[in-house]
Structure formats: structure tokens, C-alpha cells
Amino acid sequence: MSYVSAGGAPAAACVFCAALSSTDDRQSLILHRGERAFLILNAYPYASGHLMAALTRHVAGLHEAEPDELAESMRLVQAAVRALGAVYRPDGFNVGVNQGSVAGAGVAGHLHVHVVPRWHGDTSFMPVIGDTKVLPESLHDTYDRLSAALRS
């Protein structure tokens, strides 16, 4: 009865909260921990260097976030853009929030801002024909490069 009254299967653990509870930031892909927000690499990136600034507090929407949480997450977005620019030299960036699963949020319950470096002509035949992305380095190599850039 508890399963039926709860509306279905229990929700999966939040990937952001799970990463925050880890003591191994490299393994959990956390690049920087702030007081109210943190930077984490996307485990399923659209491009090399795709990362996110997420609130430390588990809230789903902009309307639930406190101004100081939003301010810190935007400061981290700025730091991420600087580090990505130094390491990858992209031609531009996609920066955005997908609020709610219908808007494309893969983790709809925990507010986060995507930062995706972009290059001229970065859509090749692989994603178009093969529905596959090819990334030139491992996530841990990306982590090491960006972690160093964020510290400098």
C-alpha cells in the first residue's frame, strides 16, 4: 500500500547529492566545492569540458533558490568559463538551466547550470548519423586539466 500511495517506484538517489556526500572529489567529478554551490563535470558530456554549477542545497527550481545561492553559482559559472577558455580555447559557450524534465533536465530535482564549450563546426557526422559523441579525452583527464586551471 505504501508503494501505491506514494505514486510508484521510489525516486532514484540524486546524483548531485551523492557526489557531495563522497569524500573523493576526483572520483565524483567535483571540481570545486563552495559554501552554497559547487562545480561538477557532467558524467555524460555533450562536449569535452561540459560541466555544471549546482546548488549545494537540494532544490528543484530557480524560484526555490536563495539569492546568495544563485550568486555563488553564477560566480562559479564565471570561473568555469575562464578555466575552460584557458584549457580548451573554445569559440563560444552554451550556458543554461533546464528547469523540469519537460525542459530537458536530466536531474530535474536539483538545480544546476550547464556550461558547455563550443567550437565552430563541432557537430560532426558521428552524432548526426551514429547518434554517438566522440570525446578526445577521459573524464578524469578533463578533471585534472580543469582542476589545475581553476586553482591558478
Image: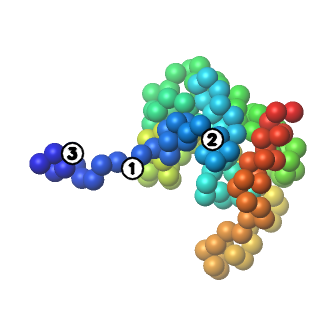
Against 70, residue 149 (above or below) is: below
Label of residue 12 in the image: 1
Q: Nearer the viewer, mark 3 or mark 2?
A: 2
In the depicted view, which residue is nearer to us: 62 or 44? 44
Mark 3 → mark 2, Cα distance in angstroms: 34 Å
Q: Earlier in the sequence, mark 3 or mark 2?
A: 3
Residue type for callout 2: Asp
Neighbours of disc 1 within 10 Å: few (<14), some (14-19), many (20+): few
Residue type for callout 3: Ala
At a point 44% along the width and 52% down the height, the residue shown is 102
Residue type for callout 1: Ala
Neighbours of disc 2 within 10 Å: few (<14), some (14-19), many (20+): few
At a point 69% along the width and 51% down the height, the residue shown is 50
**Where does residue 5 sit, x and y in percent of width and height?**
16, 46
Label of residue 24 in the image: 2
Q: Is residue 21 visible?
A: yes
The C terminus sits in image quarter: top right
Judging by the rendered image, the residue that carries numbered circle 3 is 6
Q: Which image quarter: residue 33?
A: top right
